[in-house]
Image: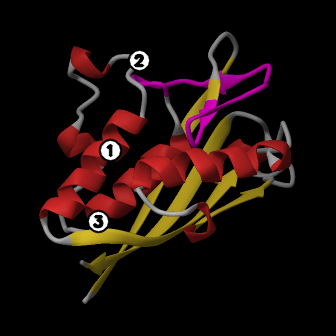
């Protein structure tokens, strides 16, 4: 049996914050603003796993009103979601994700993102796809005001 989930996330870009995507520090003059480390890619994948399991979204499990999660590393959330899947007899089959960011270009970071996500997801990196898009100067992404990530996850019954 398979279950499929979709997740998305968006964070405002601001000065004096790190830009972390897929657990990787991306060199940038702007970083993502958020209660945790604001890793939009990891949040989208976490939400996709929760969605596949019909367990709500990341905010239901890790509310931004809870000080425990202030500046938390987003892999904490992803590890929790993977444990929830395993506890229900599922493992991650594959992930397909897209990050939308006007700049900097993400190509130099993609392989490291795939590797770091694969470790936490407990799968091989060839089952993790991360693509990068720009906003072509349109909307908040194109104007360098935001970073957006979307992910689809397929869970397989173990």
As helix, strand or loop, the secondary structure at mark 3 comes to helix
Q: Classify 129 as above or below 29.
A: below
Contact check, label 3 and label 1, Cβ < 8 Å = no
- The image quarter containing residue 147 is top right
Q: Quadrant of the N terminus?
A: bottom left
Q: Is residue 153 visible?
A: yes
Residue 16 colored in magenta in the image: no
Q: Which mark is residue 71?
A: 2
Q: Residue at x 79, y 19 (%)?
A: 29
Quadrant of the image containing the C terminus? bottom left
Q: Please, which colouring scheme is shown?
A: secondary structure
Q: Where in the figure is residue 123, as x and y percent of width and height?
A: 46, 62
Segment tinted magenta in the rendering: 20-37
For the residues labelled 3 and 1, the Cα–Cα distance comes to: 15 Å
| Distance from the alpha carbon under mark 3 to that under mark 2 | 24 Å
The tag earlier along the polypeptide, 3 or 2, is: 3
How many numbered callouts? 3
Q: Residue 137: x percent and y percent?
A: 86, 49
Marks 3 and 1: which is nearer the front?
1
The residue indicated by pointer 1 is 79
Whole-percent x and y of residue 90?
24, 71
The residue depicted at 21 percent of the width and 68 percent of the height is 53
Q: Residues within 10 Å of mark 2 (few under 14, many from 20)?
A: few
Q: Secondary structure under badge 2? A: loop
Q: Earlier in the sequence, mark 3 or mark 1?
A: 3
Residue 156 horizontal side relative to residue 120, left or right: left
């Amino acid at each position: 049996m398979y279950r499929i989930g979709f997740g998305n996330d968006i964070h405002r870009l601001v000065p004096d914050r790190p830009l972390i995507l897929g657990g990787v520090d991306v060199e940038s003059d702007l970083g993502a603003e958020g209660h945790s480390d604001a890793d939009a890619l990891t949040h989208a994948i976490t939400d996709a796993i929760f969605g596949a399991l019909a367990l709500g979204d990341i905010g239901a499990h890790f509310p931004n009103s809870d000080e425990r999660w202030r500046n938390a590393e987003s892999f904490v959330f992803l590890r929790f979601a993977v444990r929830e899947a395993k506890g229900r007899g599922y493992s991650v089959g594959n992930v397909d994700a897209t990050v939308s960011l006007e700049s900097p270009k993400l190509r130099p970071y993609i392989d490291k993102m795939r590797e770091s996500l694969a470790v936490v997801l407990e799968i091989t990196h060839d089952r993790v796809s991360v693509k990068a898009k720009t906003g072509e100067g349109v909307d908040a992404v194109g104007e360098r005001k935001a970073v957006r990530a979307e992910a689809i996850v397929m869970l397989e019954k173990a």
